[in-house]
Amino acid sequence: MWPRVDGMRGLELGSPGAVRDRLNALVLAGEKRATTVLLAEYAEEAEGMDHPGERQALLDNDGRRVATLEITGVATHLFGEVPWEHAAAEGEGDASVEEWRAGHRRYWAEAGTPVDDATPVVCVAFRVLEDG
């Protein structure tokens, strides 16, 4: 189960450490407005799908809330069919959807969960409601 903070489901972006710090900074700067989650993670964590209007606590490396997010969109895609609009909204500086896919493949492979074009993923869009 994902952590709960202030009555909200917690969102922990990336891996703990520098990656999470960088991604959270992008969210707080308004550059990162989306993330991608492996569909299998919801079942593994016994979690329901995100839904528009849901509020989530963006968490730092110590599990503290650094912002409150509102989910604005949720779509399930095969990894190889994630649209550029979503990849660009992740705000991580990728120049193309191919570059975005390569970076995400690397990330998930290093985490022990290799993906291919047929892997189902959930594309989650959000907006910052308030910091801290």
Image (cartoon, rainbow, N blue to C red):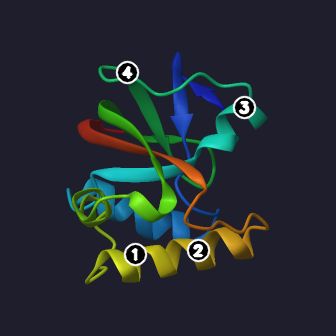
Q: Position of residue 58 (x, y in %)?
A: 45, 42
Question: Which residue, given by chain and number where applicable, does mark 4 sit on?
Answer: 54
First along the sequence among labels 4 and 2: 4
How dense is the environment of label 4, judged by Cα within 10 Å: few (below 14), some, or many (20 and up)? some
Mark 1 neighbour density, 10 Å: few (under 14) some (14–19) many (20 or more): some
Per the image, the residue denoted by label 3 is 43
Label 1 and label 4: CA atoms lie apart by 26 Å
Q: Amino acid at mark 3?
A: Ala
Height in image: 126 above or below 92?
A: above
The structure residue drawn at horizontal position 74% and vertical position 68%, both measured from the top left corner, is: 111
Earlier-in-chain disc, 3 versus 2 = 3
Please name whichever residue, 117 or 55, is drawn nearer the observer in this view of the structure. 117
Q: Secondary structure at mark 2?
A: helix
Horizontal and vertical percent position of residue 16:
64, 62
Provide the secondary structure element on which disc 1 rests: helix
- Distance between mark 4 and mark 2 Cα atoms: 28 Å
**Of the residues shown, which amino acid type is indicated by label 2?**
Arg
Kind of residue sitting beneath label 4: Glu
The residue located at (38%, 38%) in the rendering is: 75
